[in-house]
Amino acid sequence: MESKYLTVFVTAPSVEDGSQIARILVKEKLAACVNILPGITSIYTWNSEICEDSEVLLIIKTRIDLFEALSATVQKEHPYDVPEVIALPLATGASNYLDWIDKVTR
């Protein structure tokens, strides 16, 4: 059975930036829920340099059919030139939770 739900991961430079993005996604019904995990460290290559930054991680629960609109909204609202927007399908979940995702998203 193919999943119709996703967990989307987005990093942001601060709790404030992450919260702003999360509120927009929930308000526009592109996400049912967004968890914001502070205090992560990201090490990555940017402009041929190895960088290390403190960030927050957004864990977004949504439907697969909303991913393109969700990604476009993150791209528009995010302060980074190339924000991380990656997704994993939900293999399974509690039926009442998945029903709730359907109910509160577009």
Image (cartoon, grey):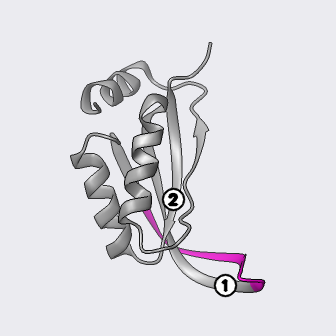
Give residue 69's quadrant in the image: top left
Q: Residues within 10 Å of mark 1 (few under 14, many from 20)?
A: few
* Frontmost residue, 76 versus 92: 76
> Residue at position x 34%, y 21% from top?
99
Give residue 47's quadrant in the image: bottom right
Residue 79: x %, y % from top left: 42, 74
* Frontmost residue, 80 versus 34: 80
Residue 10's disc is 2
Residue 27's disc is none
> At numbered mark 1, what does the secondary structure look like: helix, strand or loop?
strand
Up-down relation of residue 87 to residue 93 (above or below): below
Q: CA distance from mark 1 to mark 2?
A: 17 Å
Asked if residue 19 is among those painted magenta in the image, a careful observer would answer no
Residue 91: x %, y % from top left: 61, 27
Dominant secondary structure (helix, strand or loop) of the stretch shown in magenta: strand
Q: Would residue 49 appear left or right of 71 to someone viewing this image?
A: right
Residue 22: x %, y % from top left: 33, 57
- The residue range painted magenta reads 36-49
Asked if residue 45 is among those painted magenta in the image, a careful observer would answer yes
> Residue at position x 61%, y 18% from top?
2
> At numbered mark 2, what does the secondary structure look like: helix, strand or loop?
strand
Q: Which residue is mark 1?
A: 52
Ranked by sequence position, the earlier of labels 1 and 2 is: 2
Up-down relation of residue 79 to residue 29 (above or below): below
Mark 1: amino acid: Glu
Q: Would residue 20 appear left or right of 66 to someone viewing this image?
A: left
Give residue 53's quadrant in the image: bottom right
The quarter of the picture where the C terminus appears is top left
Mark 2: amino acid: Val
Q: Residues within 10 Å of mark 2 (few under 14, many from 20)?
A: many
